[in-house]
Amino acid sequence: MVVEEGQVLPGQAMPFAGACRWLISLDYDETLRSQDPLHPVPAEFYELMREWRPLGIRWGINTGRTLPYLCQELLPTAPFLPDFICTCERYAYAAQEDGQLYPLQEHNARCYVHNMEVRERVTPLLHAQLDLLRKQLPALQWIIAPTDPLSVEAEDAATMDDIMAFLVPFLATLEGVAAQRAGRYMRLADSRYCKGSALQAVAQQWQVPAERWVMLGDGHNDMHAFRMFPEAFRGAPANAHPDVLAWMRKHGGYISPCTGVMDCLHAWKRHMMTER
Protein backbone atom coordinates (compact mmCIF):
# COMPACT_ATOMS: atom_id res chain seq x y z
CA MET A 1 0.00 0.00 0.00
CA VAL A 2 1.35 3.40 -1.02
CA VAL A 3 0.62 6.20 1.46
CA GLU A 4 0.71 9.56 -0.28
CA GLU A 5 1.57 12.87 1.35
CA GLY A 6 -1.54 14.28 2.99
CA GLN A 7 -3.28 10.98 3.68
CA VAL A 8 -4.34 9.52 7.01
CA LEU A 9 -1.83 6.84 7.93
CA PRO A 10 -2.97 3.22 8.22
CA GLY A 11 -2.30 1.69 11.61
CA GLN A 12 -2.36 3.20 15.08
CA ALA A 13 -0.11 4.69 17.71
CA MET A 14 -0.07 3.22 21.20
CA PRO A 15 -2.99 4.15 23.46
CA PHE A 16 -2.33 7.32 25.42
CA ALA A 17 -4.01 8.39 28.65
CA GLY A 18 -3.65 11.68 30.45
CA ALA A 19 -1.74 14.80 29.47
CA CYS A 20 1.27 14.74 27.14
CA ARG A 21 4.21 15.94 29.23
CA TRP A 22 7.19 15.27 26.95
CA LEU A 23 7.81 15.08 23.20
CA ILE A 24 10.66 13.07 21.67
CA SER A 25 11.49 14.04 18.08
CA LEU A 26 13.81 11.68 16.20
CA ASP A 27 15.53 12.02 12.88
CA TYR A 28 15.14 8.77 10.93
CA ASP A 29 18.08 8.00 8.63
CA GLU A 30 21.41 7.56 10.42
CA THR A 31 19.72 8.30 13.77
CA LEU A 32 16.70 6.16 14.69
CA ARG A 33 17.06 3.82 11.72
CA SER A 34 19.40 0.84 12.05
CA GLN A 35 21.19 -0.93 9.20
CA ASP A 36 19.03 -4.04 9.54
CA PRO A 37 16.51 -4.01 6.65
CA LEU A 38 14.22 -6.43 8.51
CA HIS A 39 14.20 -4.28 11.65
CA PRO A 40 14.94 -0.69 10.57
CA VAL A 41 13.85 0.58 13.99
CA PRO A 42 15.43 -1.57 16.73
CA ALA A 43 13.05 -3.65 18.85
CA GLU A 44 14.62 -2.28 22.04
CA PHE A 45 13.54 1.22 21.03
CA TYR A 46 9.89 0.17 20.82
CA GLU A 47 10.21 -1.56 24.19
CA LEU A 48 11.61 1.62 25.70
CA MET A 49 8.70 3.66 24.34
CA ARG A 50 6.26 1.16 25.92
CA GLU A 51 8.12 1.42 29.23
CA TRP A 52 8.13 5.23 29.18
CA ARG A 53 4.51 5.65 28.14
CA PRO A 54 3.23 6.17 31.72
CA LEU A 55 5.61 9.15 32.02
CA GLY A 56 3.43 11.10 29.59
CA ILE A 57 5.85 10.73 26.67
CA ARG A 58 4.84 10.90 23.03
CA TRP A 59 7.41 10.29 20.32
CA GLY A 60 7.71 10.84 16.61
CA ILE A 61 9.86 10.70 13.51
CA ASN A 62 11.03 14.04 12.10
CA THR A 63 12.60 13.43 8.71
CA GLY A 64 13.48 14.88 5.35
CA ARG A 65 11.92 11.82 3.72
CA THR A 66 8.59 12.08 1.96
CA LEU A 67 5.71 10.22 3.57
CA PRO A 68 5.59 7.49 0.87
CA TYR A 69 9.33 6.88 1.16
CA LEU A 70 9.16 6.65 4.95
CA CYS A 71 6.03 4.49 5.07
CA GLN A 72 7.20 1.90 2.56
CA GLU A 73 9.82 0.85 5.10
CA LEU A 74 8.23 1.76 8.41
CA LEU A 75 4.69 0.38 8.08
CA PRO A 76 5.56 -3.27 7.33
CA THR A 77 7.87 -3.50 10.35
CA ALA A 78 6.51 -1.22 13.08
CA PRO A 79 4.55 -2.86 15.95
CA PHE A 80 2.82 0.51 16.41
CA LEU A 81 3.01 3.91 14.78
CA PRO A 82 4.78 6.97 16.18
CA ASP A 83 2.56 9.54 17.85
CA PHE A 84 3.58 12.03 15.19
CA ILE A 85 5.47 12.18 11.93
CA CYS A 86 7.04 15.21 10.27
CA THR A 87 8.07 14.79 6.64
CA CYS A 88 10.02 16.81 4.04
CA GLU A 89 11.27 19.00 6.92
CA ARG A 90 7.85 20.68 7.01
CA TYR A 91 4.65 18.59 6.89
CA ALA A 92 3.15 17.31 10.15
CA TYR A 93 0.90 14.39 11.14
CA ALA A 94 -0.32 13.70 14.68
CA ALA A 95 -2.26 10.93 16.40
CA GLN A 96 -5.80 11.74 17.47
CA GLU A 97 -7.96 10.02 20.07
CA ASP A 98 -8.56 7.02 17.79
CA GLY A 99 -4.80 6.44 17.56
CA GLN A 100 -4.61 7.21 13.84
CA LEU A 101 -2.26 9.86 12.48
CA TYR A 102 -4.02 12.67 10.64
CA PRO A 103 -2.37 15.49 8.71
CA LEU A 104 -2.39 18.88 10.39
CA GLN A 105 -4.36 20.33 7.52
CA GLU A 106 -3.99 24.06 8.11
CA HIS A 107 -0.26 23.88 8.79
CA ASN A 108 0.42 21.55 5.88
CA ALA A 109 -1.63 23.57 3.41
CA ARG A 110 0.23 26.73 4.37
CA CYS A 111 3.57 24.94 3.93
CA TYR A 112 2.53 23.67 0.53
CA VAL A 113 1.41 27.04 -0.83
CA HIS A 114 4.49 28.88 0.37
CA ASN A 115 6.87 26.24 -0.94
CA MET A 116 5.18 26.19 -4.34
CA GLU A 117 5.75 29.94 -4.49
CA VAL A 118 9.44 29.35 -3.73
CA ARG A 119 9.60 26.61 -6.38
CA GLU A 120 8.19 28.90 -9.08
CA ARG A 121 10.53 31.74 -8.19
CA VAL A 122 13.75 29.84 -7.51
CA THR A 123 13.77 26.86 -9.91
CA PRO A 124 15.19 28.71 -12.94
CA LEU A 125 17.79 30.46 -10.78
CA LEU A 126 18.94 27.22 -9.15
CA HIS A 127 19.11 25.35 -12.43
CA ALA A 128 21.26 28.12 -13.94
CA GLN A 129 23.67 27.70 -11.04
CA LEU A 130 23.66 23.93 -11.44
CA ASP A 131 24.55 24.35 -15.12
CA LEU A 132 27.59 26.33 -13.99
CA LEU A 133 28.39 23.61 -11.47
CA ARG A 134 28.42 20.97 -14.21
CA LYS A 135 30.81 23.06 -16.30
CA GLN A 136 33.18 24.01 -13.48
CA LEU A 137 33.19 20.71 -11.56
CA PRO A 138 32.29 18.03 -14.13
CA ALA A 139 33.67 15.17 -12.02
CA LEU A 140 30.98 15.55 -9.34
CA GLN A 141 28.23 12.95 -9.56
CA TRP A 142 24.74 14.28 -8.81
CA ILE A 143 21.22 14.61 -10.22
CA ILE A 144 18.20 16.84 -9.80
CA ALA A 145 15.52 14.78 -8.05
CA PRO A 146 12.90 13.66 -10.59
CA THR A 147 9.98 14.67 -8.35
CA ASP A 148 11.29 18.03 -7.10
CA PRO A 149 13.19 20.59 -9.19
CA LEU A 150 14.61 22.18 -6.02
CA SER A 151 16.12 18.92 -4.70
CA VAL A 152 19.59 17.62 -5.50
CA GLU A 153 20.83 14.08 -4.86
CA ALA A 154 24.60 13.62 -4.78
CA GLU A 155 26.67 10.47 -5.03
CA ASP A 156 27.66 10.73 -1.37
CA ALA A 157 27.86 13.21 1.50
CA ALA A 158 31.37 14.33 0.52
CA THR A 159 30.11 15.25 -2.95
CA MET A 160 27.27 17.22 -1.38
CA ASP A 161 29.87 19.06 0.71
CA ASP A 162 31.49 20.21 -2.55
CA ILE A 163 28.14 21.15 -4.10
CA MET A 164 27.12 23.18 -1.08
CA ALA A 165 30.47 25.00 -1.02
CA PHE A 166 29.87 25.99 -4.65
CA LEU A 167 26.28 27.13 -3.98
CA VAL A 168 26.92 29.17 -0.81
CA PRO A 169 27.35 32.56 -2.58
CA PHE A 170 24.24 31.92 -4.69
CA LEU A 171 22.15 30.85 -1.69
CA ALA A 172 23.05 34.07 0.12
CA THR A 173 21.19 36.00 -2.60
CA LEU A 174 17.89 34.14 -2.13
CA GLU A 175 15.61 36.00 0.28
CA GLY A 176 13.33 33.76 2.31
CA VAL A 177 14.91 30.54 1.07
CA ALA A 178 16.91 27.97 3.06
CA ALA A 179 18.87 24.89 2.05
CA GLN A 180 17.66 21.82 3.92
CA ARG A 181 20.45 19.27 3.72
CA ALA A 182 20.71 15.69 5.00
CA GLY A 183 23.77 13.69 4.02
CA ARG A 184 23.85 13.41 0.25
CA TYR A 185 20.46 15.09 -0.22
CA MET A 186 19.62 18.80 -0.36
CA ARG A 187 16.46 20.74 -1.12
CA LEU A 188 15.70 24.44 -1.21
CA ALA A 189 12.60 25.47 0.68
CA ASP A 190 10.78 28.38 2.25
CA SER A 191 12.93 29.41 5.20
CA ARG A 192 9.91 29.72 7.50
CA TYR A 193 9.53 25.94 7.55
CA CYS A 194 11.90 23.31 8.87
CA LYS A 195 11.93 20.35 11.23
CA GLY A 196 11.62 22.78 14.11
CA SER A 197 8.49 24.52 12.82
CA ALA A 198 6.89 21.15 12.03
CA LEU A 199 7.61 19.92 15.54
CA GLN A 200 6.21 23.16 16.94
CA ALA A 201 2.94 22.57 15.06
CA VAL A 202 2.70 19.11 16.63
CA ALA A 203 3.56 20.39 20.09
CA GLN A 204 0.78 22.96 19.92
CA GLN A 205 -1.74 20.15 19.51
CA TRP A 206 -0.77 18.77 22.91
CA GLN A 207 0.38 22.02 24.57
CA VAL A 208 3.92 20.86 25.25
CA PRO A 209 6.45 23.72 25.67
CA ALA A 210 9.87 23.47 24.01
CA GLU A 211 11.68 22.95 27.30
CA ARG A 212 9.96 19.55 27.40
CA TRP A 213 11.14 18.47 23.95
CA VAL A 214 13.88 16.02 23.05
CA MET A 215 15.36 16.56 19.57
CA LEU A 216 17.87 14.03 18.22
CA GLY A 217 19.45 14.18 14.78
CA ASP A 218 22.63 13.80 12.79
CA GLY A 219 22.37 16.20 9.83
CA HIS A 220 22.38 19.81 8.77
CA ASN A 221 18.59 19.88 8.52
CA ASP A 222 18.41 19.00 12.22
CA MET A 223 20.55 22.03 13.06
CA HIS A 224 17.76 24.36 11.93
CA ALA A 225 15.55 22.92 14.66
CA PHE A 226 18.38 22.90 17.22
CA ARG A 227 18.95 26.62 16.65
CA MET A 228 15.26 27.51 16.92
CA PHE A 229 14.68 25.86 20.28
CA PRO A 230 17.75 26.07 22.55
CA GLU A 231 15.58 25.29 25.58
CA ALA A 232 14.99 21.73 24.28
CA PHE A 233 17.27 18.79 25.01
CA ARG A 234 19.34 18.44 21.83
CA GLY A 235 21.45 15.42 21.03
CA ALA A 236 23.36 13.75 18.20
CA PRO A 237 24.69 10.22 17.65
CA ALA A 238 28.38 9.56 17.25
CA ASN A 239 28.04 9.22 13.47
CA ALA A 240 26.55 12.70 13.00
CA HIS A 241 28.05 14.99 10.36
CA PRO A 242 31.20 16.73 11.64
CA ASP A 243 29.46 20.11 11.30
CA VAL A 244 26.68 18.90 13.61
CA LEU A 245 29.15 17.55 16.16
CA ALA A 246 31.07 20.83 16.13
CA TRP A 247 27.85 22.77 16.61
CA MET A 248 26.84 20.55 19.51
CA ARG A 249 30.16 21.06 21.26
CA LYS A 250 29.86 24.82 20.90
CA HIS A 251 26.24 25.05 22.05
CA GLY A 252 26.10 22.50 24.83
CA GLY A 253 24.20 19.71 23.10
CA TYR A 254 24.68 16.07 23.98
CA ILE A 255 26.97 13.97 21.78
CA SER A 256 26.57 10.24 22.18
CA PRO A 257 29.59 7.94 22.06
CA CYS A 258 27.31 5.49 20.22
CA THR A 259 25.31 5.35 17.02
CA GLY A 260 21.53 5.19 17.20
CA VAL A 261 19.26 6.87 19.75
CA MET A 262 19.29 4.65 22.82
CA ASP A 263 22.25 6.26 24.59
CA CYS A 264 20.92 9.76 23.84
CA LEU A 265 17.53 8.87 25.25
CA HIS A 266 18.96 7.46 28.46
CA ALA A 267 21.18 10.56 28.78
CA TRP A 268 18.08 12.74 28.48
CA LYS A 269 16.30 10.65 31.11
CA ARG A 270 19.21 11.17 33.52
CA HIS A 271 19.18 14.89 32.72
CA MET A 272 15.42 15.06 33.25
CA MET A 273 15.64 13.36 36.63
CA THR A 274 18.45 15.71 37.69
CA GLU A 275 16.42 18.77 36.70
CA ARG A 276 13.26 17.71 38.49
Image: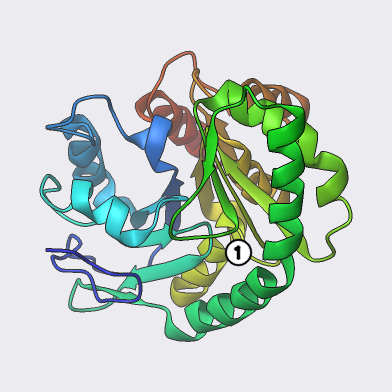
Farthest residue toward the top?
257
Q: Is residue 190 visible?
A: no
Q: Residue at x 15, y 68 (%)?
A: 10
Q: Residue at x 35, y 36 (%)?
A: 32
Q: Position of residue 152 (x, y in %)?
A: 56, 45
Q: Position of residue 16 (x, y in %)?
A: 23, 65
For residue 251, what is the image quadrant?
A: top right
**23 lies above or below 138:** below
Say which element carries label 1. helix
Task: State left or right for residue 63 relative to residue 179.
Answer: left
Farthest residue toward the front?
135
Residue indicated by mark 1: 197
For residue 157, what is the image quadrant?
A: top right
**206 lies above or below 49:** below
Quarter of the N terminus within the rendering = bottom left
Looking at the picture, tell me which residue is in the foreground, 179 or 274.
Answer: 179
Q: Position of residue 69 (x, y in %)?
A: 30, 52
